[in-house]
């Protein structure tokens, strides 16, 4: 779904047949200004999307930006002002705020994870644990907060997880079938394989023909052993049960990536407000 398609669908969900509160009370020719005020400290995100929302409704709307996506903001600061029809402002208000509050919360939490491991080489990854149809923007927020995007969906990377492996009949068969399928269909996709034990790691190493090994639900001690066993032959990714309070213990092992669904699904929306002024 493109950004324009998302905006159109989201506005349809909210406006439906018409914003009757505004239509009934505000002259259609009325002009106004909306000011986005910061009410909580954090990393701001979604400003670019907010501008697209306003200008989707009114291409001539004047959007004055004072903060950029990724800036650290404090209470009382202004992120942007927009001059437009009052009807445009009132239709765009809630959608813009919902998107920005959600994205800013994700960017802020992601940045906390990134800062917690800044002395190590490890990168923070997101996951597919996202809000349906809002994934692109949530993953944008992860990048704005300093994280790295994992695959966007099921189509841009092969990830052989426990269920694939079990249904297929084992690690060796899953890798073999995948390699044959990709070759037969001329697909240049990276292959990641989930492991649950050190023995699984040994089996993956024996087969090869993959790009990344996921080390799922390992303790930091076992993860350290696995990373040493892999010895840089493939990318490594730790996942499962990793939170802000223990992420540094995992990064200390030298693992390449840590994937944390929590940076999206545990993020708390940032408090923002859009205050209107009549021109």
Image (tube, grey):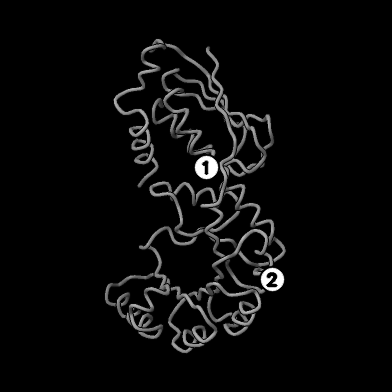
- Indicate the secondary structure of the residue bearing disc 2: loop
Q: Quadrant of residue 44?
A: top right
Q: Earlier in the sequence, mark 2 or mark 1?
A: 1
**Residue sitting nearer the eye, 28 or 240:** 240
Measured as percent of width and height from the top left, residue 97 is found at 51, 33
**Residue sitting nearer the eye, 235 or 115:** 115
Query: Which residue is at 50% across, 24% downward?
Result: 62
Q: Is residue 206 above or below residue 47?
A: below
Query: Which residue is at 45% across, 84% downward?
Result: 208
Q: Quadrant of residue 4?
A: top left
**Residue sitting nearer the eye, 128 or 268:** 268
Please tell me how crowded label 2 is: few (under 14), some (14-19), or many (20+) other residues with Cα within 10 Å: some
Query: Mark number for residue 252?
Result: 2
Query: Which residue is at 37% across, 79% downward?
Result: 166
Furthest toward the left, the residue is: 184
Query: Mark number for residue 162?
Result: none
Query: Mark number for residue 102?
Result: 1
Residue 26 is left or right of residue 263, and the answer is left
Q: Is residue 191 above or below residue 201?
A: above
Measured as percent of width and height from the top left, residue 15 is found at 35, 28
Residue 84 is left or right of residue 242, and the answer is left
Query: Which residue is at 48% across, 39% downward?
Result: 99
Please tell me how crowded label 1 is: few (under 14), some (14-19), or many (20+) other residues with Cα within 10 Å: many
Measured as percent of width and height from the top left, residue 181 is found at 30, 76
Q: Are marks 2 and 1 in contact (CB under 8 Å)?
A: no
Q: Quadrant of residue 227?
A: bottom right
Measured as percent of width and height from the top left, residue 148 is found at 55, 58
Q: Is residue 18 above or below residue 272?
A: above
Residues at marks 2 and 1, CA–CA distance in whole angstroms: 30 Å
């Amino acid at each position: 779904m493109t950004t324009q398609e998302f905006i159109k669908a989201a506005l349809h969900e909210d406006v439906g047949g018409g914003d009757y509160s505004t239509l009934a009370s505000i002259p259609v020719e009325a002009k106004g200004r909306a000011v986005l005020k910061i009410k909580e400290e954090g990393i701001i995100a979604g400003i670019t999307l907010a501008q697209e929302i306003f200008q989707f409704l009114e291409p001539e709307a004047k959007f004055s930006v004072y903060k950029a996506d990724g800036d650290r903001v404090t209470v009382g600061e202004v992120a942007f002002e927009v001059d437009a029809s009052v009807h445009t402002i009132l239709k765009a208000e809630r959608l813009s705020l919902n998107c920005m509050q959600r994205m800013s919360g994700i960017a802020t939490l992601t940045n906390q994870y990134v800062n917690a491991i800044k002395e190590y080489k490890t990168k923070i990854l997101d996951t597919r644990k996202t809000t349906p149809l809002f994934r692109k923007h949530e993953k944008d927020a992860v990048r704005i907060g300093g994280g790295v995007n994992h695959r966007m969906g099921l189509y841009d990377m092969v990830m052989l997880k426990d269920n694939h492996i079990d249904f297929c009949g084992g690690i060796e068969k899953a890798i073999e079938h995948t390699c044959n399928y990709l070759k037969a269909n001329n697909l240049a996709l990276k292959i990641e394989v989930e492991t649950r034990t050190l023995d699984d790691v040994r089996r993956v190493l024996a087969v090869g023909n993959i790009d990344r090994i996921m080390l799922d639900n390992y303790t930091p001690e076992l993860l350290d052993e696995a990373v040493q066993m892999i010895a840089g032959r493939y990318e490594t990714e730790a996942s499962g049960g990793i939170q802000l309070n223990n992420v540094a213990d995992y990064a200390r092992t030298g693992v390449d990536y840590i994937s944390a669904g929590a940076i999206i699904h545990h993020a708390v929306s940032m408090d923002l407000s859009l205050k209107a002024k009549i021109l």
